[in-house]
Amino acid sequence: HARAVQSGDDDGPAVIAHRGASGYAPENTLAAVDKAAELGFRWVENDVQRTRDGELVVLHDDNLRRTTDVEEVFPDRSPWKVKDFTAAEIARLDAGSWFGSRYAGARVPTLEQYLERVEHNHQKLLLELKNPHLYPGIEQQTLKVLANEGWLDRWHVADRLVVQSFSADSVRTVHELKPAVTTGVLGTPPVSDLPEYAEFADQINPSHGSLSMSYVSSVHAFTGPHGRPMEVFAWTVDDADTARRVAGYDVDGVISNRPDVVREAMDED
Ligand code: G3P
Ligand code: CA
């Protein structure tokens, strides 16, 4: 079937650098975006959440402990939730040292900073609304930032942006607010739910462990809100055997911390 989203390189699945090329640089930092570009990958995935004072930032966990030095800088602020810190406080944190000393000083990017770097690198973005139940209105706010940064023009929405979430309600909200945007629901909903999802989601994006060839072909049989077959992006695939397995299922995208490993495995076929 015709693919709406392409890797740009060949006919195989798109390869998406998960949290940036996060096997090689600290996840969700600008360094991980640049690393993906350096390795030749156009698609990057990220996770968007909100600070106490309403700034959108790029971070995976709902707290800052694992990927920053927050416990040293703010020892009295347990449990160090993103939503309890201001943007200025988060901007002081080191989000690179935990990964390696050469990344010392990497920051938690704001969504604006992140979009500007992806644009600068001529890359494409798979944006995840992470934990949206914690951040009422984050769908509308994210769309506003995307619009302000020029990411909702026809050129971007045609081919350079997908907004996804584990929350189907959030994805539906994004679709209702901005129908032009390509959307994806994370997880593996039962096939019986796909007719409903096809009203607002262009993609169903499952963990590779819960994926089968018949599930992928079931998804492909539905037409998404933009009149194209629904697509499947599988995550998080970091080894050659799994990459070959899911490529054999005819997935449309493979999300990986080590996109070079995935690309090489798929090129061998
Ligand atoms: O993009 C898919 C994947 O990122 C979903 O899981 O926990 O890594 O955000 P997680
Ligand atoms: Ca994610």
Image (cartoon, helix red, strand yellow):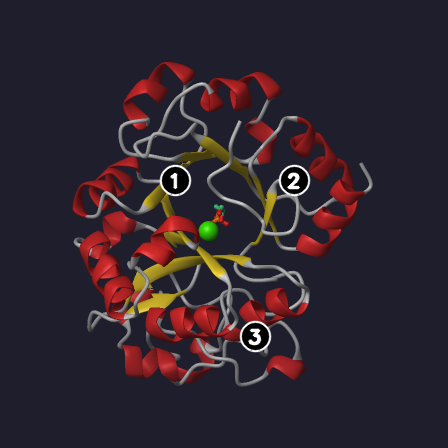
Q: Please state the horizontal and vertical placement of residue 238, each as a whole percent of the image.
A: 68, 47
Q: What residue type is labelled 2?
A: Gly
| Nearer-N-terminus badge (1/3) | 3
The residue singled out by tag 2 in the image is 12
User: Residue 108 falls in which quadrant of the image?
Assistant: bottom left
| Circle 3: element type | helix
The residue that mark 1 highlights is 184
Front residue (pair 99, 118): 118
- Element type at marker 2? loop
Cα separation between marks 1 and 3 = 26 Å
Q: Mark 3 points at which residue?
A: 31
Which disc is residue 38 wearing?
none
User: Mark 2 or 3, which is nearer the eye?
Assistant: 2
Comparing 11 with 149, the one in front is 11
Dot 1 falls on a residue whose secondary structure is: strand
Residue at position x 24%, y 46% in the image: 174
Mark nearer the N terminus (1 vs 2): 2
Task: Report how far apart the C-alphas of labels 1 and 2 lie in the structure.
Answer: 19 Å
- The amino acid beneath tag 1 is Gly
- Position of 223 relative to 87 (above/below): above
- Mark toward the viewer: 1 or 2: 2
